[in-house]
Amino acid sequence: MQIKQEMGNTRNEKKDCMKMRIGGEWADPAGGASIEVTNPATGEHIDRVPSGDHRDVDAAVAAAESAFPSWAYRSYGERGMILGSCARLLRERIPALAPLLTGEHGKPLVEATGELMGLAHVLEYYHSISGTVHGEYRNLRLYGNAIVTHTPLGVVGAIIPWNMPGLLMGWKVGPALLAGNTMVLKPASSTPLTNLSIAALFEEAGLPPGVLNIVTGSGKEVGEPLVLHPAVRKVSFTGQVETGKRIAELAARGFTRTTLELGGCDPMIVCDDADIGEAVEGAVRGRFYNCGQVCTAVKRLYVFEDVAERFQKLLAARLAGLQVGNGMDPGVDMGPLNNAEQHRTITALIEGVREGGEGTIVTGGAVPQGERFIRGNFYAPTLITDVAADSPLLREEVFGPVLPMVVVEGLDDALAQANASRYGLGASVWTHDMRRITSACEQLQAGIVWVNQHLRIPPEVPFGGVKESGIGRENGYGSIDDYSNLKSILIAPGKGRP
Ligand code: NAD
């Protein structure tokens, strides 16, 4: 396969199965089982990866433990330089890596390219702040001289989902490694190839062996042993709420720190003074980018009644024009869902809406017509109006290209409905009225609020959820604290005055 040749030495030598990355080597699993990786646009086999277990987790943690002392001893500047080199090499290799990501995930090539550029940007951000990480000194007079230092935690675990494997890897690897930790990362089973290739690429760029290890396998066989491993000091998890609850329970047994980045059911509020054209584009990108499989995708649309009819007409026309297809084909706007289970879930959900009369399907609501859609996990961009208030479309996170639109009387009504959710990840308001902007920013129960945009998450600012959308934050300067132990040192005051 062409991609395998282009990846050069970022790929293991054995051609029939990609291996795990442990201690800077392509490692065979302790057991013999493997996981097949398929192309969601064609159903074709792409590769296989080992289905690891607790023995592989033990080996990876041991490799991370032995790499830890010398990595932790380096200065922030030295570690940051290496992250910068990783970003540079990554940018050079994006043309080879992006097709691999599209192949295993399904997203259009332009989105895969953008995601990997986003990963490079994350690493560049951590490189850029590496010279500024410092402790604190305060003369507290009677209490003495106080010094606060950061020390790394040790080995940290990372568990990531399949929707943005490249970017989410960066959100965890960047701050963890800059803070001096070493890491064992478990990718999702349907998208492990990009993560494995990037880990090897980092080592090519100068990351010492064992600093970043990848163990592939299921949540039960690899994820749980990683969370329970006594040498793992922190676990950063991104995924579904229910999995996050399980991880929180397991981590509590060993007092292991956690950051939990969980699901979202983001509202987007369109006021009557909004630029309707821009808001329609925002809804299209906010919901249908990555085939709707984004934690902060627009999952509920609340539109003021005065502009609802016009908004709906424009939105439906845009959706009808979206090109659905194989992400490798030029001009494709939206690829397939990542996996068959996801396709079954979306199909069943829409059937339920149809049968239960829970809403009016304005456009989509089925697999697109045509031969080329038969074998992949394709689903048409779907807009649903007149949605019943208790419909799962509004209550639960729908991880696919389905957008429910609700007409609201005004801002108070919109804010009340937006906040009536167990989730609280992101939210956006579209208006140019300063009082409305202020009210919405103050009242929306979310970790991130956008004004006249939705979806963008730069590494410079903290990101995370409230309510059941998670605990803790990723990104931003504070993430260095989250991957560090803060140690306070108090030196007794000298005798007498200067
Ligand atoms: P998931 O929870 O099913 O799986 C995520 C990861 O956890 C996978 O690697 C999986 O193998 C692993 N896992 C599963 N069970 C486990 C267990 N018992 N112990 C340890 N690990 C286990 O999530 P998914 O379906 O892959 O991803 C989609 C979800 O991720 C959505 O809910 C989405 O909103 C969320 N997400 C959140 C953010 C965020 O930053 N808040 C970002 C992206 C995705």
Image (cartoon, rainbow, N blue to C red):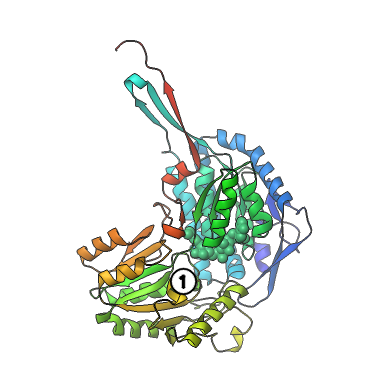
Please name whichever residue, 156 or 416, is drawn nearer the observer in this view of the structure: 416
Mark 1, Cα crowd under 10 Å, few <14 / some 14-19 / many 20+, is many
Task: Determine whether 478 is above or below 330 in the image.
Answer: above
* Residue 11 picture location, percent across and down: 68, 57
* Residue 331 picture location, percent across and down: 49, 78
Residue 84 visible in the current orientation? no
Looking at the rendering, the quadrant in which ligand 1 lies is bottom right
Give the residue pinned by disc 1: 289
Q: Quadrant of the C terminus?
A: top left
Q: Quadrant of the N terminus?
A: bottom right
Left or right of 251: which side holds 461? Answer: left
Residue displayed at 47% across by 70% down: 396
Left or right of 468: which side holds 275? Answer: left
Please name whichever residue, 166 or 1, is drawn nearer the observer in this view of the structure: 166
* Residue 98 picture location, percent across and down: 56, 65
Residue displayed at 45% across by 87% down: 357
Q: Quadrant of residue 197?
A: bottom right
Say which element carries label 1.
helix
- State how many labels appear: 1
Task: Determine whether 127 is above or below 352 in the image.
Answer: above
Residue closest to the far top: 496
* Residue 351 picture location, percent across and down: 53, 84
Amino acid type, residue under disc 1 in the picture: Tyr
